Image: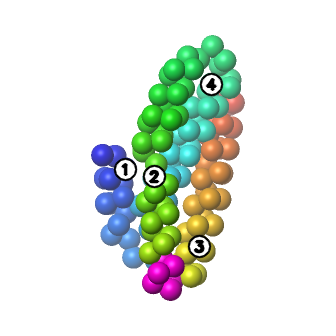
Amino acid sequence: MLRYAIGSWMAHSKAGVPLGTMTVNVIGSLLIGLVLGWALKYPATSPTLVLLLATGFCGGFTTFSAFAFENYELLKNGNYLYFGMYTGLSLALGILAVLIGIWLTRLF
């Protein structure tokens, strides 16, 4: 429901890329970075809890299938510049968000 709410809210943007899915995926990447960073910092963290949060919540919150479909739509409509921007930014920001999440857990 949270993914849908963010996607719907961001859908009203006039940008040429699907900002809703990108935003959800970057937030999810940050969250998984925080969860995994916490687990690395505190090895006694329950593996079941890490699995629940990383795979369960973050996996259910983010959506690769929507990302793939939106890329297909951009390509189908000939929006090659937006396709490149959306794909590149999604990957770069997602990876950066994971790194920031892990880095933040090291601070506390």
Instruction: Describe the element under mark 3 as helix, strand or loop.
Output: helix
For the residues labelled 3 and 4, the Cα–Cα distance comes to: 33 Å
> x and y percent of residue 25 in the render?
50, 52
Residue placed under numbered mark 1 in the picture: 3
As drawn, the label of residue 97 is none
Query: In the rendered structure, does residue 82 fall within the stretch colored magenta?
Result: no
Q: Quadrant of residue 6?
A: bottom left
Task: State which tag comes first along the sequence, 3 or 4.
Answer: 4
In this picture, residue 40 sits left or right of residue 56 = right
Quickly name the residue at label 4: 39
Q: Is residue 41 left or right of residue 49?
A: right
Q: Residues within 10 Å of mark 3 (few under 14, many from 20)?
A: few
Q: Which residue is mark 3?
A: 85
Distance between the alpha carbons at the discs numbered 4 and 2: 23 Å
Q: Is residue 16 above or below residue 40?
A: below
Residue annotated with mark 2: 63
Earlier along the polypeptide chain: callout 1 or callout 4?
1
Disc 1, disc 2: CB below 8 Å? yes
Does 43 appear above or below 36?
Answer: above
Task: Confirm whether the magenta stretch covers residue 77.
Answer: yes
Asked if the residue under mark 2 is in contact with the one under mark 4, i.e. CB atoms within 8 Å, the reply is no
Within-10-Å neighbours for mark 4: few <14, some 14–19, many 20+: some
- Image coordinates for residue 4, horizontal then vertical, percent: 32, 53
Identify which residue is drawn at 50% across, 35% down.
Answer: 55
Q: Amino acid at mark 4?
A: Ala
Q: Which contiguous range is marked in magenta?
A: 74-79
Q: Which residue occupies the foreground of this view, 107 or 58?
A: 58
Q: Amino acid at mark 2?
A: Thr
Q: Is label 4 or label 2 in front?
A: 2
